[in-house]
Image (cartoon, rainbow, N blue to C red):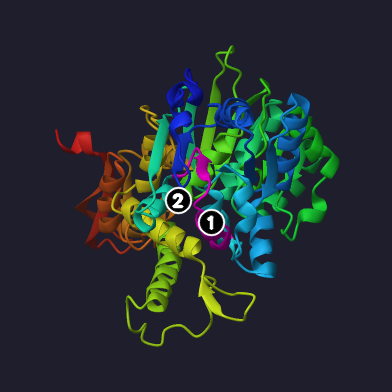
Amino acid sequence: MLKKKISEVISENYKNWNAGDMVSISSGTGSGKSYFVQHVLAEYAKQHGELILYLVPRIKLKEQTEAILEKEGITNIEVKLYQNVEAKCNNHGNNNDWLNAFKYIVCDESHYFTNDASFNDYTDISLEHLLSNSHAVILFLSATGDTIINYLKRFYKERKLIEYHLEQDYSYIEKLSAYQSDEYLYKAMDWLLENNHKAMIFIQSDRKAYQIFKKYEQHATFVCGVKSDYVEFVDKAQVDTIINEEKFDTLFLIATSALDVGVNIIDLDVQHVIIDMLDTDTFLQCLGRKRLPVEVEEKVNVMFRNYTNKQLGGYISKEAERVELGKLFYGVVKSTKGKHTQLSDIFYIDGTGTVKVNNMKYVKAAVNLKRYQKYVQKPSGYLEEIKSLLGYQEKVYIHDYLDDTNAKLAILEENINNKFSSEEAKELVKQLSLKNSKTQKVIKNISIANREMVTLGYPYEFVESKEYIVDSNGQKKQRRIYTLLSMRQNSL
């Protein structure tokens, strides 16, 4: 848990910030970023008769923030949605005079600009509009804002950027484990249900999240985005209770990334978090929804979906196409050789009917492409990335892979020292359901099965030999047989 607050890191340096400065405050959830703005900076601004514009990405977070300000009697902070800024630009042009009323512009959850670009065409409009103002100090607050900060460093070099950073401590993770199939996810949830364990489950696909919710409907609360096809199945009263009381009454909270900002769960009964999110920024945001009281030494079990290199290959292709089309638009490349027959989602049409590229979507695609290409350089690249981000030093078990491995080892151990005809050996290989690590095709050949068992670390092999048998006619015939031996036996 965080022992230090961001106010201690910034100290009184905020008194030296000047108009036009960009300030990055990067620290984990619960580090006091909002507290610093609402109490320290707001009080300083009040003493000088100055106003603060506080921008957030979700309506619930806006309402939550406004309620806190009203309760605390803070009157010099105006809260708006980023989407309000984008609508103002689309409807009334890019006149930014209205921003001159504010000494400070706070971009809370600033990863919004890149993360929401996957489904919001206009995130770059609000960013560019805010940065066109040089009268205010602009603050970027996020636990996962590296992408947007790198963008500012590259494209706004003339602006002064002041950075404050506080590392997140993930030592509260008791056990980190992984799974690779939906079948195991259901198996894990069945175990949690049988043992009455509360859990938060974050699912990348709203369709899959809804399917999981339907399976456990009597024991679950469902949350998705307002633009989702499944929003009608969200119990708004339950969501309001979660936001106001920071806990949920059901056994499971099943949510999409719509819950990745603005909602905190402070519930000692929730000791399990399951995350199916490829994007590591979103992964960390979802994990951060589980807040830990400072005075309680609480531990949490985290299980996440491990994306294989084969799965990552599909995502690489999608992001590569976006990056390629972005480069074509910007004139970096001259042609894509007629490969694209329809308008990519990286483009949008603005209020004047002009085709434009969402810069944030382009930047996010480029960042994702680089990340995914890095992951696939190792056999378990995504898993190792999650371990690294969380500073987890222990071995991470992939549950369904481990279960499958144990099942195969049990079959092999049961048949050790047994002799098989060629057909019998092939039938045993078929029973093992070994897959070629390169092609992912089921292996039928005995010699290939031997090689794959070595690759997988199974200490067994089929050893070929010949023996003579006497057939029904009294004829002596030679036949090929296979004996399953442990490699330790075979090396003696």
Quarter of image, res 129: bottom right
Where residue 11 appears, as percent x and y from the top left, is 45, 22
Comparing 292 with 143, the one in front is: 143
**Mark 1 crowdedness (10 Å alpha carbons): few <14, some 14-19, many ≥20:** many
Q: Is any atom of residue 201 visible in this view?
A: yes
Amino acid carrying mark 1 in the image:
Leu
Residue 60 in the image, given as x and y percentages of width and height = 74, 43
Q: How many marks?
A: 2
Q: Residue furthest bottom?
A: 338
Q: Residues within 10 Å of mark 2 (few under 14, many from 20)?
A: many
Q: Is 249 left, or right, of 401 in this rendering?
A: right
Do tag 1 and tag 2 residues touch (Cβ < 8 Å)?
yes
The quadrant where residue 414 appears:
top left
Q: Residue at x 71, y 50 (%)?
A: 224
Question: Which residue in the rendered view is the most extreme toward the right?
Answer: 237
Q: Secondary structure at mark 2?
A: helix
Q: Is residue 220 left or right of residue 308?
A: right
What's the residue at 41%, 32% (across, down)?
165
Task: State the residue position of label 2.
Answer: 148
Q: In front: 433, or 275? A: 275
Quarter the C terminus occupies: top left
Q: Which residue is mark 1?
A: 127
Residue span colored magenta: 123-145
| Magenta span contains residue 348 | no
Q: Quadrant of residue 242?
A: top right
Question: Outermost residue toward the left?
Answer: 492
Q: Is residue 424 visible?
A: no
Front one among 179 and 417: 179
Label 1 vs label 2: CA separation?
10 Å
Horizontal side, residue 241 vs residue 125: left or right: right
The disc placed on residue 55 is none
Amino acid type, callout 2:
Ile
